[in-house]
Image: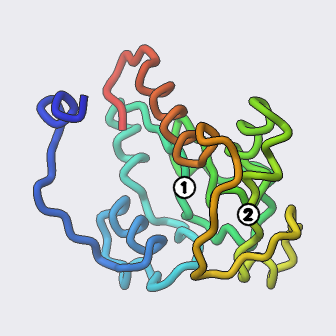
């Protein structure tokens, strides 16, 4: 399937990013602008008003656009994850900024499959979210650089959720090109 996708699409053999930090790197990639021109050099800075992301340009060219999983275009530690966020020009928008921390699409998916697994897939908030007064959903502390074992069922990982939702999107009938 990967070979078919590569043969029918565009394949990049070399890829470089403008910033080693995820949030500014995504914004640079999806706007085609340097981080310095966007005024973003680190995480925690919202997507700038007036910047036009690639998905918006492709949408006006007749593409269907989708975002599934982590986007991190807005500081996730400072917003209420029970309320909708900006969609940034995506037609399909399935957001889960950080696996297990918030009541987001990922947790709702686990809850629909097996509510008893929710406490096992939860992780505590990142330190920045605690600082901004976000509601904590678990009493298990998280240390930023320490690995931890996933306690939920194997098929309920965040990666499983993103893969399932992506496959669901890809299997839908598409009457136009998609991004």
C-alpha separation, residue under disc 1 versus residue under disc 2: 16 Å
* Mark 2 Cα shell of 10 Å, populated few (<14), some (14-19), many (≥20): many
- Disc ID at residue 108: none
* Mark 1 Cα shell of 10 Å, populated few (<14), some (14-19), many (≥20): few
Q: Residue at x 62, y 48 (%)?
A: 95
Q: Position of residue 37 (x, y in %)?
A: 36, 81
State the residue in front, 30 or 114. Answer: 114
Image quarter (top left, top right, bottom left or bottom right) of the N terminus:
top left
On screen, 155 above or below 126? above
For this view, does 130 lie left or right of residue 5? Answer: right
Q: Coloured how?
A: rainbow
Q: Residue at x 40, y 47 (%)?
A: 55
On screen, 111 above or below 121? above
On screen, 23 above or below 173? below
Q: Residue at x 54, y 40 (%)?
A: 160
Provide the residue designation for mark 1.
Answer: 70
Of circles 1 and 2, the one toward us is 2
Provide the residue designation for mark 2.
Answer: 123
Q: Earlier in the sequence, mark 1 or mark 2?
A: 1
């Amino acid at each position: 399937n990967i070979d078919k996708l590569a043969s029918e699409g565009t394949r990049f053999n070399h890829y470089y990013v403008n910033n080693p930090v995820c949030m500014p790197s995504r914004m640079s990639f999806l706007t085609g602008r340097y981080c310095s021109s966007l005024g973003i050099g680190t995480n925690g800075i919202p997507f700038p008003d007036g910047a036009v992301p690639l998905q918006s340009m492709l949408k006006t060219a007749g593409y269907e656009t989708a975002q599934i999983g982590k986007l991190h275009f807005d500081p996730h530690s400072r917003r209420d994850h029970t309320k909708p966020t900006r969609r940034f020009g995506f037609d399909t928008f399935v957001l889960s900024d950080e696996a297990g921390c918030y009541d987001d699409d990922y947790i709702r998916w686990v809850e629909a499959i097996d509510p008893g697994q929710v406490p096992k897939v939860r992780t505590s908030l990142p330190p920045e979210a605690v600082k901004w007064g976000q509601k904590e959903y678990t009493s298990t502390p998280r240390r930023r650089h320490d690995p931890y074992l996933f306690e939920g069922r194997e098929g309920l990982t965040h990666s499983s959720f993103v893969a399932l939702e992506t496959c669901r999107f890809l299997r839908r009938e598409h009457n136009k090109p998609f991004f």
